[in-house]
Image (cartoon, rainbow, N blue to C red):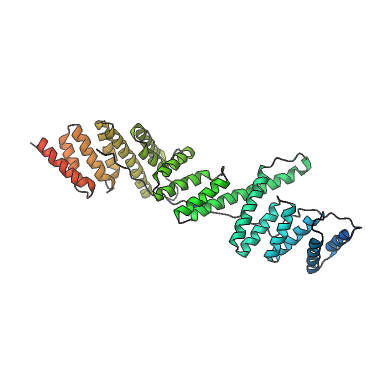
Amino acid sequence: MDRLACLIPRWAALAFFLGLLAPANSVAQRYKLVSNPDSPEGAMLDLIELTSDENKKLSLLEEFAQKHPKHASASWVNEQLQTAYITASQWDKALAAGERLLAQNPDDLEAAQFNLKAAEAKNDKVLVKLWTDFLTRVAERITTAPPPKDPEVMEAWKNRVMAAAQYTSQEEYAMLKRALDATDPKARIKHLDELCKQYPSTQYMAQALLLYFQTYQVLGDSMKMMHYAEQVLQKDPKNQDALLVVAQNAGGDKALTYGARIIELMQSKPKPQGVSDEEWTRKKNYYTGTAYWMMGNAHINGNRFGQADQALRAALGYLRRNEQAAPAILFYLGWANYKLDNFAEAARFYTECLAYRGRFQEQAAKNIDVLRREHPPD
């Protein structure tokens, strides 16, 4: 007897919601003004500070940035310029000011955020990718850097780490969301690979593994599907879908162990929110019946026909209306009872199997003929 393959259910669609963090239109001033009032540069900076006309002030800032790019106050000047350009929606100038600022201060998270905002406003996919990657690297450096020894800057450091961690978390989620939104399975795998490569310890690993599993199931890649089913179970031992796939591929006594786990799980698992009583009952019956079906197959393969009969009868009680499962279960019930010398029961199950079109129908008819010849009814 060939071992039967188990049915693998479709996964329910995952649902997530995304909230993206964008930099505010204005941020707290990050750089100090450093100047010597007796120098020409200092005099110009004093004039900038005293000027109330915003257009004139902007012109003076631009002039200073051009003439004195390495001055101690250059960061302060470029910060003012980038903020002003963002407010005025002058995206190219905002990007240029941000680049100058980051050249002097590579870990300026806010400057990188502003440049990403400018790139998004320009709808330039290349720039968006460039600044997203840049911002991610900045956030990672900030969150992994050791704390400062100076207690006076500790609070500011904590705030920076908190902001960077928040961005990192949201960028991780954005990458997962791109995978979830991908309609092409291969594109989804690519997005998941990018997430796991960039964030090998991502907080969304459980969801990513689940999505890998689902996608390889759609692609029909049984080896990788099995690999990720096992990974899912390490994160969530009570995932019935992964349990079902692992049980199907385990065979032997392992199939019995996994099948028993599925049955126990479906008896104790509460109904998820948003699922009707009817739908939940149907789902529980499917998983429980399939578990008994696999256990019956395992017993058949082990020539334990009495145990096979018990498991397959239980499976039939749950899956009799399933036109894929019922004929297989009935056929093997006929075989188990034939091996147990329960010939009348064997004939009954084979006869029921005849009602279903498919590959079991013809063989069931042949087995009935054999039974009639070997054990004619009284």
Residue 279 location (% of width, % of height) = 37, 49
Name the foreground residue: 73 vs 177: 73
Query: Does residue 21 appear in the picture of this structure?
Result: no
Quadrant of the rendering where the N terminus is positioned: top left
Q: Residue at x 79, y 67 (%)?
A: 59
Residue 63 location (% of width, % of height) = 80, 64
Q: Residue at x 17, y 32 (%)?
A: 341
Residue 303 location (% of width, % of height) = 26, 31
Q: Residue at x 33, y 44 (%)?
A: 285
Residue 174 location (% of width, % of height) = 56, 53
Q: Residue furthest left?
A: 378
Quadrant of the rendering where the C terminus is positioned: top left
Task: Give residue 50's quadrant in the image.
Answer: bottom right
- Asked if residue 343 lies left or right of residue 279, the reply is left
Task: Give residue 329's quadrant in the image.
Answer: top left
Vertical arrangement, residue 59 with respect to residue 325, above or below: below
- Asked if residue 158 lies left or right of residue 126, the reply is right
Vertical arrangement, residue 121 with respect to residue 288, above or below: below
Query: Does residue 157 appear in the picture of this structure?
Result: yes
- Asked if residue 267 lies left or right of residue 187, the reply is left
Vertical arrangement, residue 162 with respect to residue 41, above or below: above
